[in-house]
Amino acid sequence: MDDLERLADDIRDAATVVAFTGAGISQPSGVPTFRGDDGVWEKFDEGQFTYGRFQRDPVGFWADRVELQRVMFDEEYEPNAAHEALAELGRDGSLEAILTQNTDGLHGEAATSAREGGTDETTILELHGNSQRVRCIDCGKRADGDSIFERAADGELPPTCDCGGVYKPDVVLFGEQLSGAVIQRARSLAQESDVFLAIGSSLVVEPAASLPRLATSSGATVGIVNLESTPIDGSADVVVREDVTDVLPEIRALVEK
Ligand SMILES: [Zn+2]
């Protein structure tokens, strides 16, 4: 029996399956990465997008942020076969939660498409927020980012909520803490999982590095799907260094068999 079949068997037998995803799952959709030679931070100075600057200089922050959004989202990105496979596993009751480092919202979009004709109770935990949304720093109201980014591009700097509060992109900025509640939830899910799949993440930065370790230490089967090696490979049960858009649909098909 090969590795993927064993993984699929474990998923079928598991009470709780949790997937953790990083930039590598969105790369095939064309979403630009932040780091690396072609990364967004080669074109922009990441120091302009800190939480400190947002607080000090919301006008300048938003002017630069509009430009960043324009470059990053100059085209519409679509969920790819890997997002879809996870969404289908979720819809069919084989996946409890998706924890993601990505802010592109593609897991949510894939889940919405997959849900048609079924029920889907998969939890999607966006650890770093969602760049397609904004949030008022005073009343906490969230709004769809498109219209707010448009208002900012038209000169409303910074864009504000009906209550008068300034809108902030609903993502975790440099220098801003990840939500403690969200991290706690992610850790609990990793600990509860019987199967933990880490997909498209180098598993280097926190909390990505510690979640698979938590899963391992509570006895979960840990599977890693990533093109490059990760520091967790040695303790994982299954390591697959192939394209996520090939591997995830294959796992999904084996689970359904
Ligand atoms: Zn408000």
Image: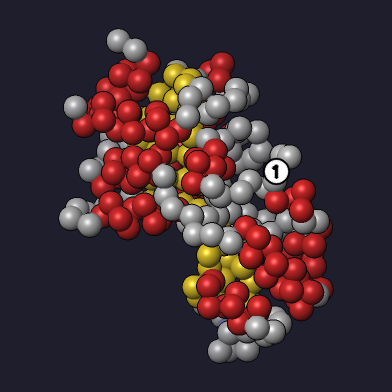
The answer to whether any part of residue 227 appears in the image is yes
**Residue under label 1:** 38
Whether residue 130 is visible: no
Q: Is residue 96 above or below residue 203?
A: below
Give the side of residue 143 with respect to residue 81, left or right: right
Q: Vertical placement of 102 versus 148: above or below?
A: above
Above or below, 31 against 2 in this view is below
Quarter-of-image position of residue 75: bottom right
In percent of width and height, residue 247 lies at: 40, 28
Amino acid on which the number 1 mark rests in the picture: Asp
Q: Residue at x 27, y 22 (%)?
A: 9
Horizontal and vertical percent for residue 43? 76, 53
Q: Residue reaching furthest top? A: 1
Q: Position of residue 237 (x, y in %)?
A: 45, 18
Instruction: In this rendered view, identify the residue nearer to me: 125 or 179.
Output: 125
Callout 1 secondary element: loop
In-front residue for pair 213/119: 119
Which image quarter is the N terminus in?
Answer: top left
